[in-house]
Image: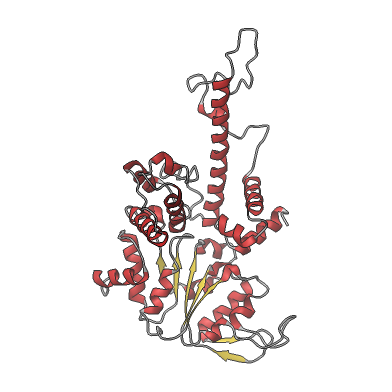
Amino acid sequence: MNQVNQAEITAAKQRFGIVGTSPALMEAVGRALRVAPIDLSVLVIGESGSGKEFFPKLIHAYGARKHAPYIAVNCGAIPEGTIDSELFGHEKGAFTGAVASRKGYFEEADGGTIFLDEVAELPLTTQARLLRVLESGEFIKVGSSTVQKTNIRVVAATNVDMARAVADGRFREDLFYRLSTVQINVPPLRDRGNDILLLAKKFAADFAERYSTPELELNDSARALLQAYRWPGNVRQLKNVVEQLALFETGEPVSRERLQAYLPDAVYAPALAVQGPAGGSDAYARERDMLFNLIFSLRSEVDDLRARLNASAPAPTPKETPLLPHFANSSPAAEPEAAFTPFTEATPRSLEESEREMIRESLERNGGRRKATADELNISERTLYRKIREYGLE
């Protein structure tokens, strides 16, 4: 960061509400400030909920296009059948429902910056159109034969392993290199150390100010747990947890035990930092986390059932056969830990079955609303649609 000093980074963080002092975060902000005045395409990479959306705004605000339009587009939220029309516009009569000509985002953003969030969700046909814009500044509206020009800067973001997407044929290699002229890596929350406590304090103070409630307090053990937790949902999840605590747990310092009730099981670091395939994608990590959450939830229920049986059932006489012999009268010394695994040979459950059940339950909780379900599961709507079709959950 030769050309960006500490004061400039601090000023940019304050301007955009970026909280934290971890070296990885400072590097990402400094890199964004350095590339902002230079009109290059930028690819922001980071896990969902890590705060990628701040960086395109920062790049636009500190660049030469700061007084021109800035348009943010969530590529994963636009149905495949209409995304070309949304991005590039369409002519009247181009398709059913096209009752008038319409400008697309690339025309509207002419002279400014367009932010393509979840860019890896773009269909291959749309990727070809985007590549032409990046190479020549040219595009054609849907239903038209006239070539139009646009002068825009593209900043894209994704939580997908792009190298794997290219290898799998889901993303064009030439477009990947065009988009990632400069790459900015946003660190996951679990790698940001004391930033977790700084963010938690900020979210608690914001909540108390907004709703005129007592400010949330955490004891030492709760703060230690905050830093030990893996935070699969990153900053977004931390904000959600802190706001729940601020609503229900004010009055006395929150203990580790009270905090733990608000955190899904099986995602503590580093004990359960199970490694996937080399260069594994975030999709793999999400599926793995869903499976672990389900396993530990079932195990918790089994442990609770065993405790209640031991507390209420009388000790068996020599002539009696103990009820549920796998759990009654068992102890760590008498039976290995593996005996309590929630999946037995009689009821195996695959990763796909676990994922299907989790999606089905989430759809029920959200009354069939797919956008709310996708938000809850931390996946794009397009991925959710595909999974619903794949698992026959229509």
By what rule are the colours in the image chosen? secondary structure
Please identify the residue farthest to the top as the structure is shown.
318
State the image quarter where residue 80 is shown: bottom right
Q: Is residue 289 left or right of residue 364?
A: left
54 to 141, vertically: above or below: above
213 to 104, vertically: above or below: above
Closest to the observer, 344 or 48: 48
**Quadrant of image for the N terminus:** bottom left
Indicate the position of residue 212 as horizontal and vertical percent values. 39, 58
Please report the residue visible at 47 percent of the width from the left and 20 percent of the height from the top: 333
Q: Is residue 237 left or right of residue 74?
A: left
Please identify the residue farthest to the right as the structure is shown.
96
Indicate the position of residue 331 as horizontal and vertical percent values. 50, 21
Closest to the observer, 181 or 266: 266
Please report the residue visible at 60 percent of the width from the left and 86 percent of the height from the top: 103
Please report the residue visible at 61 percent of the width from the left and 46 percent of the height from the top: 351
Indicate the position of residue 119 as horizontal and vertical percent values. 54, 70
Query: Residue 164, can we see it?
Result: yes
Please report the residue visible at 40 percent of the width from the left and 52 percent of the height from the top: 190
57 to 319, vertically: above or below: below
**Quadrant of image for the C terminus:** bottom right
Q: Is residue 73 left or right of residue 349?
A: left
Q: Is residue 107 left or right of residue 210?
A: right
Query: Residue 182, can we see it?
Result: no
